[in-house]
Image (tube, rainbow, N blue to C red):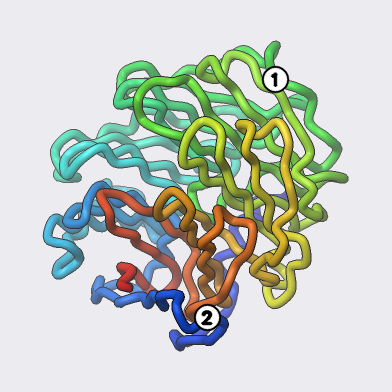
Amino acid sequence: MTALRKISMAAIGLVTLTATSGFTATAPKPSWRLSDTGVTARFRGLAPVSDKVAWVAGSGGTILRTVDGARSWQRVDPPGTAELQFRDIEAFDADHAVALTIGEGDQSRLYATADGGRSWKESFRNDDPAAFYDCVTFTDRRHGLALSDPVNGKFRILATSDGGKSWAVQPSTGMPDALTGEFAFAASGTCLVTADHFGSGRAWFATGGGERARIFATTNGGRTWRVTDSGIPSGPSAGVYSLAFRDPWHGIAVGGDYAVPETAPDAAATTRDGGRTWTPARAEPGEYRSGAAWRGVTTALAVGPTGSDISYDGGRSWNEFDSGSFDAVLCAGGSCWASGEQGRVARLHG
């Protein structure tokens, strides 16, 4: 996929925030409460830490942080990044975060802060014109992985063991071959995920673009990977856009085709065996969804530019509850957050 096509995902049109039906009389109906961020950047990077602390990262080199539950936001992006696009951010607390910019060649960079964004260190700058980094994740506070689209026929992995202060390209010997045209989507910072932050070494990443949309898994911190078909349709702009795991075994996958966001048949699946096999959802969102998250043991959320959905049965069936535009969704500390275009950031109520 060309850089232009990947970056052009930011051009999906605006959708107004309204509620929709589709719930039983006894099911709760959640709603998003928007926060005034004071900016118009598109926030595909989202990192909630608690009900008070969250970070968002997006276009125009913009990074914001709140420490008071979204009542106010501080702009804390690194200097000199106005021409870059942040697509992922991982935060450990109110002070420590790692952010990823995307693009071909040296546009793919990683930055780390240990003082709430008052200062940043550029800890990695890509020097391979064939690489294009999409997502970053951490298995604990020290160990993290970043994912690039295939280089010489295999997906490339970066690794850190010092909390994102330094990164190294990993050997490709344990990585299965990529399919022709296969890549990952830098849509919400959740194409590469872990199940926890306790050092299990487990991580997963999702793909599309090729003949099949696949999901790769590691149990040893990225040294070796196995791959399986997701069952979600794939194509030049279609595949699995987001993964979410609530533990090492239970996961959900959502996606579709960002070029045709209003329809996405069979674009959701679940696993109960750590990603070895995937089962299609009985009732999927039916539209392109770029982000997914677990809200509890059986409750999950999915968002995209045409709406938000909730599942009360672990991702097997979904109901839309909002038609506003979001790109990313994540939950932490009992609070769920969503972010997207035009500076939109919201918290879930209900």
Q: Residue at x 12, y 60 (%)?
A: 68
Q: Position of residue 295 (x, y in %)?
A: 40, 55
Q: Which residue is mark 1?
A: 175
Tell me where residue 234 appears, x and y as whole percent.
80, 52
For image coordinates 41% across by 62% down, the residue present is: 43
**Towards the viewer: 221 or 237:** 221
The residue tagged 2 is 24
* Above or below for 234 versus 275: below
- The residue type indicated by label 2 comes to Thr
- Image side of residue 315 versus residue 346, left or right: right
Find numbered disc 2 in the image and state the secondary structure of the residue it sits on: loop
Residue depicted at 65% across the width and 47% down the height: 270
Residue 316 in the image, given as x and y percentages of width and height = 64, 57
In this picture, residue 323 sits left or right of residue 282: left
Tell me how far mark 1 sits from mark 2, CA to CA: 45 Å
Image quarter for residue 11?
Answer: bottom right
Q: Amino acid at mark 1?
A: Met
Helix, strand or loop under label 1: loop
Tell me the quarter of the picture where residue 52 sits: bottom left
Check contact, mark 1 vs mark 2: CB within 8 A.
no
Question: Is residue 341 or residue 303 the one in the foreground?
Answer: 303
Residue at x-position 63% and y-position 63%: 317
Find residue 323 and report its horizontal and vertical position in percent: 52, 81
The C terminus sits in image quarter: bottom left
Residue 106 sits above or below residue 266 on the image: above
